[in-house]
Image: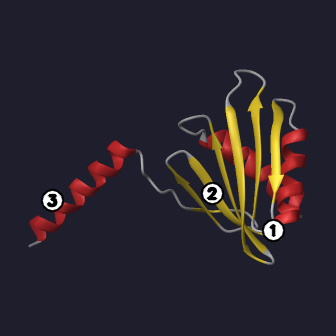
Amino acid sequence: KIKKIITASFLVISALSLNSCWLLLAGAAGGGTVAYVQGKYAMNMDGNIKDIYNATIEAVQSNEDFVLTKKSITPTDATVQGNTKVDSTDFSVTIEKLTDNASKVTIKFGTFGDRTASATLMDRIQENSK
């Protein structure tokens, strides 16, 4: 029975590795849990959707490496899109309302994601939302 469990665990890990579906969890300063799945970097944040949306726009506009290309907001979600100046990599920030005082922020750079760039942008959004 133990051998079957070990074999099944190995197969699951192998399948996740092939599909790049790893879920990495880490504590974030002043916030919630960070998830990085299929190139998308996501975190729940304290703050209503409008405050997080404004913090995101400020983070993008204050970064000399980014160009803001599109922004929109509704009562339940918001989107901020842009490109990097260096190699024109597109990125998007999606904000979903969880409660009146909590929002889920998801960032993706390019086709496959960029964890470092996403984490840096997420940190700036967090700083701006305080």
**Residue bearing the label numbered 3:** 7
Among the two numbered marks 3 and 1 on one chain, the one whose residue lies closer to the N terminus: 3
Identify the element where label 2 is drawn: strand
Residue at 87% from the left image edge and 48% from the top image edge:
57
Specify whether 40 is left or right of 54: left
Inter-mark Cα distance, 2 to 1: 20 Å
Specify whether 65 is left or right of 2: right
Q: Position of residue 7 (x, y in %)?
A: 15, 59
Inter-mark Cα distance, 3 to 1: 47 Å
Among the two numbered marks 2 and 1 on one chain, the one whose residue lies closer to the N terminus: 2
- Most distant residue in the top direction: 87
- Neighbor class of circle 1 (other Cα within 10 Å; few <14, some 14-19, many 20+) is few
Q: Nearer the viewer, residue 72 or 35?
A: 72
Amino acid beneath label 2: Ala
Identify the element where label 3 is drawn: helix
Discs 2/1, front: 1
Q: Position of residue 2 (x, y in %)?
A: 12, 70
Quadrant housing residue 20: top left
Discs 3/1, front: 1
Quadrant housing residue 63: top right
Specify whether 24 is left or right of 122: left
Q: How is the image coloured?
A: secondary structure
Inter-mark Cα distance, 2 to 3: 31 Å
- Neighbor class of circle 2 (other Cα within 10 Å; few <14, some 14-19, many 20+) is many
Q: Position of residue 99 (x, y in %)?
A: 74, 78
Among the two numbered marks 2 and 3 on one chain, the one whose residue lies closer to the N terminus: 3
Q: Nearer the viewer, residue 78 or 118?
A: 78
Residue at 89% from the left image edge and 40% from the top image edge:
61
**Residue bearing the label numbered 2:** 42
Q: Quadrant of the C terminus?
A: bottom right
Amino acid beneath label 1: Pro
**Residue bearing the label numbered 1:** 75
